[in-house]
Amino acid sequence: MTGRFRIQAELSAALLDLPLDPAWLDGIAASLELLAGHAALVMGTPLPPDIEPAPVFNP
Amino acid sequence: MNDVHDLAASVRDRQRSALSVVEAALDRVARHDPVLNCFTRVRSEAALSEAAVLDDAISRGEPAGPLAGVPFAVKNLFDVAGDATVAGSVVLADAPPAARDATVVARLRRAGAILLGQLNMDEFAYGFATENLHYGDTANPHDPTRIAGGSSGGSAASVAAALVPLSLGTDTNGSIRVPASLCGVWGCKPTYGRLSRTGVFPFVHSLDHVGPFARSVRDLALAYDLMQGPDRNDPAQSGRAAEPTLPGLEIPVPGLRVGVLRGWFRENASDQALAAVDRVADALGRLGATLSTVELAGAEAARSAAFCLTGAEGGTLHLPWLRTHGHLYDPRVRDRLIAGAMLPAAVVLQAQRVRARLREEAAQLFGRVDLLLAPATPFAATPRGDATIPIGGRPVSARANMGLHAQPISFIGLPVVCAPAQAPGDPLPIGVQLIARPWSEGVALRVARQLERDGVSTCRTLAYD
């Protein structure tokens, strides 16, 4: 599983123009795996369409 | 150490000098901080000089403020004019000194308080332990082999050991409530948008709060009141006029309805944490409150949403430094920030929608109750050194998970007073969240004062004289 997150880390770093020390990859991959569990719970929460994102811009 | 009110009154009345008060506090810091490691900088000369100036003004008959001569200290992410704001890191060590004090620091100093120094924290406020790779661990004054909690660990520990009677911290996911719980002191996380964050180094813009720690509810309320008021430089601030809590502090809330949170807030909590909530509930029932058990639906998803939003916003904020100074971060912090910056936009936006939904759930609950109770931390202080706690049947990092009952509450910006609530025989303290509806800090503080008067919630005096 960590392999998938290592790939995600490398691809995302390229998109973000973020140079990564290869020694950091395992730690970042572990953090991505932890976040993926939380993200799944967030994305699995059914919400009606009228629920708007919380921050509101006040001009 | 005296109550802040009495201390300031004695300085104003010239029964004792501000200089002698500050000298005594600096002496305590010199004797005990080598073990506790609360302070990252002690402003000895500046504090003594400011105290002498205050004494001169008082001797000339000039009016002195409600905090005259009261020593205080601030987490090292608050700007202090003339000092670099390091935010628990070495990444900012070469930053120019702050040009002016953070708004809330300036307001306390204007009231006569003397700033003793800056306090230790988790690097960039990302953690619940104050185990800092650069500045060392802050020890828990109740047992120095254990963590103080974080990220405002120096703020809570310095008050618990009575090095200062008052301190300031910040709370994004529990960073006031967690160390207050583990160190056994009072902490207040006001409503999101209540107190100005101008001059406070950010972590997660949409979740950051500032607030005080103290050893009594009266002191907590006084500090909170003095920091209130609009500040146009903080875009998240509500602009509400100050709503002082001190004048009504001794008046019990009539017809108080208390909801004990069940579900997520009873799960993954130690027997001690649950017993503390039940003791507080029983006491309030005895004092006339109506008790019920209630559920805040969606709390677990909200905690996860707060976790994601924290990583994404914090990571995005740090990207410029991560590109150039990534090797200077504690790897435990750096890896989480980088991973957060890599979260898909869909997760971030959905997290903000989960937040809006939870706000609605809470609003419905507050139609039925005036105050919610929940553990502030699932466990008392764990041993230092990356300890684990059992969550969901498996060991997980204490530094990342001590806030799991605090996170859903700050996620929707509700005001909370963290009350020390351990049983008399408990060797370590633990706190209970007194959660009020938005903008009702006064309700939480009045209930806190009732609990303090009743003897259920008090700060234990420790042997740091």
Image: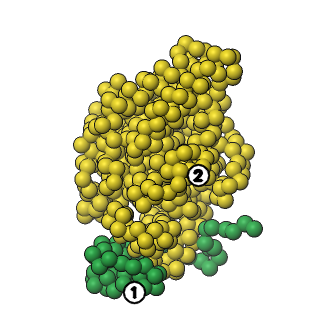
Q: Are marks 2 and 1 in contact (CB under 8 Å)?
A: no
| Front one among B22 and B456 | B22
| Front one among B357 and A31 | A31
B121 left or right of B247 in image: left
| Front one among B223 and B56 | B56
| Front one among B303 and B161 | B161
Shown in yellow, the chain is B
In the image, residue A11 sits, relative to residue B283, either above or below, namely below
Quarter of the figure with the N terminus of chain B: top left
Residue at 60 percent of width and 30 percent of height: B112
Residue at the disc numbered 2: B199
* Image label count: 2
In the image, residue B353 sits, relative to residue B445, either above or below, namely below
Residue at 36 percent of width and 84 percent of height: A10
Tag 2: amino acid: Gly
| Residue B137 seen in this snapshot | yes
Residue at 63 percent of width and 73 percent of height: A52
Residue at the disc numbered 1: A11
